[in-house]
Structures are given as structure tokens and as C-alpha cells.
Amino acid sequence: MSDTIILPAPAPSGSRLGNAGFVIGLAICGLVVLMALVGNFMVPHDPWTQNLNERLIPPFFMEGGGAEHLLGTDQIGRDYLARLMYGARISLMIGLATVITSGLIGVTLGVVGGFFGGKVDDVVLFAITCRLSIPIVLVALAVVGLLGSSLFLVVATLGLLLWDRFAVVARATTMQIRNLDYVSAALCAGISTPQLLLREILPNIAPHIAVVATLEAALAILLEAALSFLGLGVPPPLPSWGLMIAEGKDYMFFSPWVIMVPGLALCILVFGINLLGDGLRDLLRTGRVT
Amino acid sequence: MTRFILRRLAVGILVAFTVVVLSFMLTRLSSDLAISIAGPQATQTDIEIIRKAYGLDRPLYMQFFSWVGRAAVGDFGESFFFKDKVSNLIASRMPITMTLGLVGLVLALVMSIPLGILAAVREGTWVDKAVTLFTMIGQAMPSFWLGLILMIVFGLWLGWLPISGIESWQSFVMPGVVLAFTAVPALTRLTRSGMMEALSSDYIRTARAKGLLRTSIIFKHALRNAAIPVVSIAAVQLGFMLGGSIVTETVFALHGVGFLAWESIGKNDFPVVQAVVLVLAVLYIALTLAADILNAVLDPRLRSA
């Protein structure tokens, strides 16, 4: 329905944060991946053990903190650093799994709509418009609320909701290359349509899809945190960063760090992923990736 | 122009109908509504009574058509928990959500338009980079977390603003800022790229050549053209804000429509949930329609689309 949202946003021209941004983004994402993979082997505590004698110990840089619990403990005495490390796994898993699901749906719809055009494209556009008019957070909350919270359900719900931008970009880029010579050449060579889409179209729109994937991964991570914060996301005692903020909320006025630590972790990760996406887009525009 | 509006209207109605089907299906996801309404202590007879009372024993398509038929005239049934008409509930909570959405939109525009202009005028300098950094940080912050931080800083430490609930206009400041931040990055980028495009166009070169004042060039000539997409996206962003206000309302305990939906989800109060989904979706559809028409009025080139 609306051109204002169906058309992909114009690539912002001129200076973004440049190459430095891309490197920083890569470094942040690498660090979080490392946290998720080996973090819990480096911390002497596990994220589950409660110790009611050691509740709400502040991090090492604050008064009362110590080397035993570097980032302190939560309201039931679980080691905050261990929980933070484990939370990185959950965030990354959510981001990755959601992007794979929504990417499959969105790219398929977008490529098919963009390539065939006409009535097929109308249907795809209609699907995108419908999807955009659905309030994501509310619907995700309702689904999890009705079916019960689980990691799988959160991923499935977000995956089914976040495909719109994939479809928009896949559609637009497919339309751009549909009439290029190499596509006609492949057609003349007698390639079948599915083959053409998979072998010629898909590899050529892949870089654009990768940019969308970073944006959507960041969005999925933020949405999972919001759902978990509202009590309808990842179930406790899993240490999702959003859930850690929710659990720390009652203590935030006396010990603000209980919400600062997981909140900053979320910010930094999402910031890093977005930097990566922006850097990727810059590389695309300057033509160093084709 | 009339044809254009009629066409968009038809698509809008079709989208709304699809959302009706989806929001109905959404609440039928759980295996048996009667069991979840009855609660854990219910006996089999209780469940049967509830199933009959709410008409859940009828075939699905009959439930659907009776719901659609009544929803079309604004009757969304009765809430299980609040024991009140859903339409009354939504109507009484809507002013808060609307106020919040409008405050958020105004704050977002007030922040992002000057920032976008500044970044475009000082393109490539540290000012531009600082604005980019600001929007990226804004994009990375979870809104519920920003809300909590504002509560700690402005509510507890400085004591300037009330932490939750609605006592006066001040109660809308922090939630408004939080909601505004969901739109600021997109609006700033849009203003920046629109301004940059306008500033590099021929008519601006002409204006410069005529020796017009720099401020007059920026605000009178360039901004007028750069504002077109911003205005229409702002309407769409308002739609997103109304849909996303559920998080902000819950954080600040503002009893608007979002808070109502959150409460109802927790209580399996499905008539309320499906009605709120529908109402928010229809609002969004209406806003994008308004944005399209506004766009066509402001920019005649789009009317042929």
C-alpha cells in the first residue's frame, strides 16, 4: 500500500563512521562470540548456583566488590559475570536463529516477487504491507503468553515476524538485476527458472541481504530482551540479558549496577552488530564487495 | 487524485481484513481456550460450562464470523477479567496511549530534524560523525532499559520527574522521551540524507549564486524539499510508536492500551488481546494511508503511482 515504506531506504551517502567503524564492529562481535563460546570456562562460577549469603555483591570497581565475583552477584547470589557470559550465548543464538528463519521467508518472497513481477509481485507486496501493520511486540507477547515461554518459541515467533525488510530489499535488488545481460544469457543457455534464481540472482543480491541480516539480528536481540523483560520471553533461570534486567529491576534504586551491567552488554552488542552492518553497506557502495 | 486515494483505501481495507483473520487465529493458537480461561483448579464440568458460555463449542468458522460481524460495528465482546465491554476498556485507555504517542512523536521530531540538518550542513566533519554516533547509540539502546535508567537518574537521583503512574503532564516526559528514541535514529538519518540531496541540487546552487543568505537557503529552500519524506515517515513512525508503546507503558505503569494488552495476555483474556491487536493495526493502516495521501499532496510526482 505505502510507497513510503515499501521502497528501501536510500543508501545514506557520504561519511558514516567509515572503515574504523567496521573494524570496531567486527571486534565487538568477535568479543561477544568469544564470551559465548569460552566465557563460561574462564569464570570460576557457574550461572546457576545460588548463594543467599552472597546476595547483591557489587562489581569489583565499586566499594564492597572483590575479585571473587568480578561483576558482583544478583539478588539470589548467582555470579553476575557467569550469567553475563551465558547470556551472550542466548542473545547470539536468538539473533542467528531468527535471521535464518526470517531470512529464508523474506528472501524467498522478495526474490519471487521481484523476479516474476505482475500479479505475483502484487501478492508479495500485499504480504509485506500486512506484516508491517501488525504490531510486532504485542503479537510476539501474545503468542508467547498463550503458548508458554520457551527459547524455541521466541525464535520461531520473531522469525515469523521479522522477514519484512528481507523481502523489501530482496525484491528491490532482484528487480534491478532481473534485466541485466548475464541473466538473459543464462536464460538463453536454457537454465531452468529455479536454477536461475538460485545460481544467478541469489549470489548477486547476497551482499545486500547480509546487510539486512545484521540489522535484523540486532533487532531480534533487542526484541528478545524486551520480551524477556516483560516476563514473556526466555523463561528463568536462563540468564537472558533482558531477564537479568527484569530480575534486577526491583533492586535498581539501591544497586543500579544490576541493570547497568546487562543493559550495557546489550547496548554494546547491538551497537557492534549495527557498526558491522553499516561498514558492510559502505563496502558495498564503494564497490569493494560485489 | 481521487482514484489514487480510493485505490489506497481499498488496499487498506483488504489489509485490515487480513489482520482480522490473523488476530483471530492468534488467540486460537493455544489448544483449548476454555481450559486456560477456567484455570488450573477447574473441574471438567466448569470447563464445559465456560465453553458453552463463551460459544467456544461452536465450529471455528462460526466463532470467526460472529466475532467479525460484531467487531465491524465496534463490539469486541466482553473481557473475562475486567467484566466489562472490551470496547469500553479500549476507549477508556486510548487517550493515554494517544497522548504518549503524540508526545513521543513531537519529541522525536524536535530532536531529529535539527540534528539531521546539522549533520547535513556540516557533512563529513566531526559534527556529522557525532550525530551518526548518537543515532547509532540510540538505535542500540533497549527502550525498556533507557526507561529504567531515566527513572534512576531523573526520578531518584535528581528527583525532577515522577517515576511511574499519571499525576500530571510531567508523567509523560520520561515515557515520551523513551518512545521518541525508537524513532529518532530513523528520522535523523532521513532528514540528513534528504537535506544533503536538497543541498546538492541545482536550485540550491542557483539560490547560492543569487547571493541568498545561508540560513534562508537552508531553511526556506532545502528544508522544504527535505521535509516531504520526513513528514510521511513521521506518520508511519507514529503507528510504530502506538504499537510499540506496550513496552514503555509497562515500564512506567501508564495504564494505556499497551498496558491493558500486557495485563490481558497474562490473564489469557483473549477478547481483549485480539481487539487490541486489531485496533492498533487499523490505526497503523490509517496512519500509513494518511502518510501516502499527504505525500501525494506535497509531491505531485507521486500521484501517478
Image (cartoon, coloured by chain):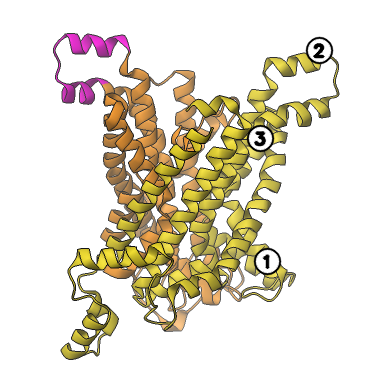
Residue A281 drawn at (x, y percent):
46, 29
Label 3 is placed on what type of residue?
Ala
* Front of the two marks 1 and 3: 3
Quadrant housing residue A43: bottom left
Q: Residues within 10 Å of mark 1 (few under 14, many from 20)?
A: some
- Chain B image colour: yellow
Label 2 is placed on what type of residue?
Ala
Q: Are marks 1 and 3 on the same chain?
A: yes
* Numbered circle sitting on residue B42: none
Find disc 2 in the rendering and name its residue: B209
Q: Are marks 1 and 3 in contact (CB under 8 Å)?
A: no
Q: Quadrant of the N terminus of chain A?
A: top left
Q: Examine the structure image and report whether residue A198 is included in the region drawn in magenta.
A: yes
Q: Report the Cα–Cα distance between label 2 and label 3.
A: 23 Å
Which residue does the image show at 18% across and 9% down from the upper left?
Answer: A188
Q: Point out the stretch of residues depicted in magenta.
A: A180-200
Quadrant housing residue B27: bottom left
Label 1 is placed on what type of residue?
Val
Which residue does the image show at 32% across and 14% down from the upper left?
Answer: A179
Residue A14 drawn at (x, y percent):
60, 25
Name the secondary structure under disc 3. Answer: helix
Residue B150 seen in the figure? yes
Find disc 3 in the rendering and name its residue: B227
In the image, B225 versus B279, the foreground residue is: B279
Q: Are marks 1 and 2 in contact (CB under 8 Å)?
A: no
Q: Is residue A190 left or right of residue A241?
A: left
Q: Chain of mark 2?
A: B
Query: Closer to the N terminus: mark 1 or mark 3?
Result: 1
In the image, B69 versus A34, the foreground residue is: B69
Q: Report the Cα–Cα distance between label 1 and label 3.
A: 34 Å
Find disc 1 in the rendering and name its residue: B153
